[in-house]
Amino acid sequence: MSGVRRVQSGSPWEEAFGFARAVAAGDRVVVGGTTSFKGDVLYGEGDPYEQARVAMANALEAIAGFGLGADAVIRTRMFLTHARDADAVGRAHQEVFGAARPVTTLAVVSGFVDPRILVEVELEAFRGAGA
C-alpha cells in the first residue's frame, strides 16, 4: 500500500509475531505495545515508574523515525499488571506527556508475555494533513 511506512525496533517479538513497532499511514502514526525492554534487557525490573518511563521513551523513539516527538502524541494507552502502580505510572506519563495532554486510557491486565513486565504503553501521533 502506498503511503504506509513501518519502523522496527529490533524486539525479538517483532520477528517472531510478524509486527512493526510503529506504522505511519496518512496523517497518523501508531505505536504498538511497547515495554521497557531494550534488546534483551528489561530496564526498571520491579519498578513500575521506571518501566513506564523507559517504555514511553521507547515509543517516542519509534515516532522519532517519522520526525515526531511528544507534542505530536494525541492518544496513549497504558496497561498495568497491578492497580497499585497507577499513581507511579501516571506520574511518569505526566512527566513525559503533560505538556501535550493526549487522551489516555489506563487499564489493568492479567499479565504480559514476560512476567517481569509491569507496564506496556501504546501511542498514536498526528503528523498533519500534509504528511
Image (tube, grey):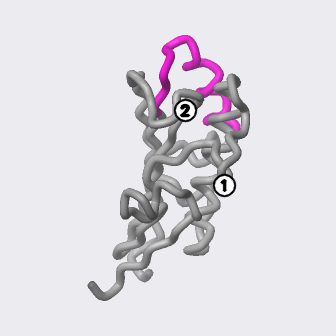
Observer-nearest of 90 and 82? 82
Mark 1 sits on what residue? 39
Please, which residue is most extreme toward the front here?
Answer: 16
Range covered by the magenta-colored residues: 79-95
Q: Position of residue 89 (x, y in %)?
A: 61, 27
Q: Position of residue 109 (x, y in %)?
A: 39, 24
Q: Is 93 included in the stretch rendered in magenta?
A: yes
Neighbour class for label 2 at 10 Å: few (<14), some, many (≥20)? many
Instruction: State the mark number for residue 10.
Output: none
- The amino acid pointed to by label 1 is Gly
- Residue at 64 percent across and 42 percent down: it is 36
- Residue at 39 percent across and 22 percent down: it is 110
Q: Position of residue 114 (x, y in %)?
A: 52, 34
Q: Position of residue 41 (x, y in %)?
A: 70, 45
Q: Is residue 128 above or below residue 52?
A: below
Mark 2 sits on what residue? 119
Please, which residue is most extreme toward the left here?
Answer: 1
- The amino acid pointed to by label 2 is Val
| The C terminus sits in image quarter | bottom left
